[in-house]
Amino acid sequence: MMMLNGLAAWTGLLCALVGFVALALALFAAGSGHLGWALVAAGVLLGSLGVGVGFVAAVVHYDHRHHNRTPRLF
């Protein structure tokens, strides 16, 4: 079970990092007048954060159901 918790923690962290980079790209693209690229970056932002939060939430729910520890990165 420890592998699933580690996978959830690292997946959540990676998706959050991708989301922050996509946020910076979306803001830069919108500020420079490239609306299409801003929408693409915003889609990547919402998708990555959704996948990260969904994956961690699913593992937390599984752990609570089976009385295991919740995912911890450190």
Image (cartoon, helix red, strand yellow):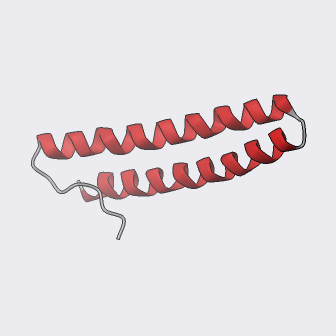
Q: Position of residue 62 (x, y in %)?
A: 21, 40
Q: Is residue 63 above or below residue 13?
A: above
How many labels sit on residues? 0
Pick the front one: 30 or 9:
30
Q: Is residue 18 left or right of residue 28?
A: left
Q: Is residue 20 left or right of residue 3?
A: right
Q: Position of residue 14 (x, y in %)?
A: 53, 54
Pick the front one: 48 or 68:
48
Task: Tell me the residue at 35%/58% (across/down).
Answer: 6
Q: Is residue 27 left or right of residue 20?
A: right
Outermost bottom residue: 74
Task: Tell me the residue at 72%/38% (across/down).
Answer: 41
Q: Position of residue 8 (x, y in %)?
A: 37, 51
Q: Position of residue 21 (x, y in %)?
A: 68, 52
Pick the front one: 34 or 62:
34
Task: Tell me the residue at 68%/35% (across/down).
Answer: 42
